[in-house]
Every structure is written in structure tokens, then in C-alpha cells.
Amino acid sequence: MQNPGNWIDRRVVYKEDIGSFLYASSIQNCRRDSHGGKMFLNKTIIFCLLLMLLFSPCTASEEDTHTIGSDAAVPLSTPEQTGMLDLIVKEAFARVGEKVTIIGLPSERSLLNANQGVTDGDLVRIVGLENQYPNLVMVPEKIWDFEFVAFSKNRNITLSREWKSLDPYSVGIITGWKILEQNIHAREISKVSTPELLFTLLDKDRVDLVIYNRIEGYGTIKTMHLQGISVIEPTIESREMFLYLNKKHGELAQRLAEAIRQMKEDGTFADIVNKSLQDYLP
């Protein structure tokens, strides 16, 4: 997974390098006159090249497309942007006349980038994060419910619907999942940056259990071809999840919320959910 800051920086540097290259190329088109041997610049070439740089289609496209960071895994999000959440968000933006691309980022980095305005938003988070990250605005219509459950190789572990039932165990979580960081006080906590690393901890017996969203856990187990890992019932907690925007796009929040509500009413939302999840449910 590439660092989001680097991803943005490389685009900026690339544009600056193009400008430097064009300028250097135009310098090479200088020629000496036959009298004084003086160098002079072909202004027509410079002008045309700068126009190409400033008004190229790719530059306009980048500026018109919103970028949303997400740490969601299969089947909720994919690198091809064909996961359930990807399709829901893209459809919602399309209904309000906007373009969007979803980029996969580590959880904590995705959140910080959205708050700092490096990206335009973050997908998906629990309610109330704007209290901790003041530059974020929540789109006030839930996108999904996350079931936070324990996965383990030891089926003899007994848990309840309370976070404190995790206290006797060594537990793995993903850095940046605030609800887990705030509520888990286990004997030992191991933090990693991706679901693949999370389930590798469990597969290699480095933790007793990992806490993750149920449907993404199923997806990760399937994509990693893991055996002998199961959910320890019951669900510890279920929470509504939301899309967040950087405040510079705050005017879109209500419009996107209405678009998501319309998708639920006209059946589009259910169609996306059913098609996206059918291959991952046990």
C-alpha cells in the first residue's frame, strides 16, 4: 500500500518536472544569429508548450475528481474500486454531479490525510469523529453497519457482548480503528496497518484473537486462503458507519446524504449490497 502523502506529492512533483523539462527543451531551441552570436529564445515554442501543460486534459480531470481515502478491504473495497462501499460512494457522487475516486490507504493515514485536506474525505468511520478531527464533516446518512467481532483459531475462547471480555487475551487490531483503540484493554495488544498483517498475526499464533469487522474478516480469510479461523460469537458491538469529507467540501454533505437515501428507496443500494457480498458470506 503506498503512502498517501507520497502519492499526492509525486503528482505535484511530476507537474513541476514537466514544466522544467519543457523549459529546458525550449532552451535547446535557441539559436545564434549570424551577426552578434547572441542567443535568443523561440517564444512561440515556449508559449505552445506552456499551453499544453496548463490545459492538458489530465490536469483538468485530476482537479475535477474528488479523492476519498479508505482502508476498507474486500469485499467492501478493492483496488479496482468495485467493492460494495466503492460502488455506493461512486453512485452517490454521480447523483450529485460529482466525480470521485477511492484510494486504498492505511487506516490512520487515511484519516489524517482527510483531516489535513491532502485527500477530500475518508471512508468509512463511526459517528462523532469530527469532535477529534475538526476539519472533517460527516455525511449524515449511514452507509453500513459494522459488526465488530473476534476471529480466532481457538474455538474454546468464550466472549460476551462487552469489551472487557477481551481483557485476558492477547489481541490484534488495526492502527487507526478508533473504536477499538478506545475500548480494548486486553492483556496484550498488537497493532498492525493492514488486514493481511492482522490475520497473519493470528495465523502464525502470535495473538489469541483479532478484532475486525465481520464481513471484511470473511473477505480477508477468503482472499488469503486461510484455514481453521472462525468467528467467536457473539458480536461485541455493532456501529453505524459514515462517509466523512474534508470541511472544504462540506456543502456536499447534505446532498450526498440525500443521494444515499434515494439509493436505499429506489433499490439501488440493496442491489449493490447483494451483488457485492453474495460470494463472501459463510
Image (cartoon, rainbow, N blue to C red):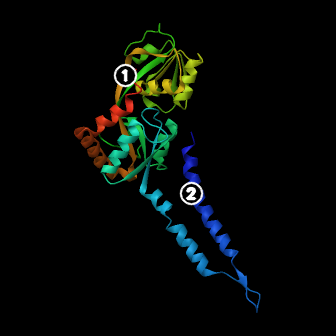
Q: Which mark is residue 237?
A: 1
Task: Name the residue at 43% across, 40% down.
Answer: 82
Instruction: Report the residue at 43% width, 23% height from top.
Output: 183
How many numbered dots are placed on residues in this image? 2
Please tell me whether mark 1 sits on a helix, a strand or a loop.
Answer: strand
Q: Position of residue 102 (x, y in %)?
A: 45, 44
Closer to us: 216 or 122:
216
Label 1 or label 2, whichever comes before in sequence order:
2
Q: Can residue 278 be seen in this view?
A: yes
**Residue 185 percent location from the top left of the image:** 48, 20
Q: Name the residue under label 2.
A: 12
**Residue 214: assigned label:** none
Answer with left or right where residue 269 lies relative to residue 61: left
47 horizontally vs 111: left or right:
right
Q: Residues within 10 Å of mark 1 (few under 14, many from 20)?
A: some
Specify the quadrant that holds the N terminus.
top right
- 207 with respect to 98 (left or right): right
Q: In the image, what residue type sits under mark 2?
A: Val
Q: Is 36 situated left or right of 107 in this image?
A: right
Q: What element carries label 2?
A: helix
Residue 191 seen in this snapshot? no
Contact check, label 1 and label 2, Cβ < 8 Å: no
Percent across and percent down for residue 136 are 40, 45
In the rendered image, which quarter is residue 49 located in?
A: bottom right
Rendered position, 145 above or below 265 = above
Residue at point 37%, 43% (across, down): 89
Q: Say what amino acid the circle numbered 1 marks.
A: Glu
Residue at 42% x, 28% y: name it: 179
Residue farthest along the bottom direction in this orientation = 35
Instruction: Give the answer, above or below, for where 25 lies relative to 126.
Output: below
Mark 1 or 2: in front is 2
Q: Quadrant of the C terminus?
A: top left
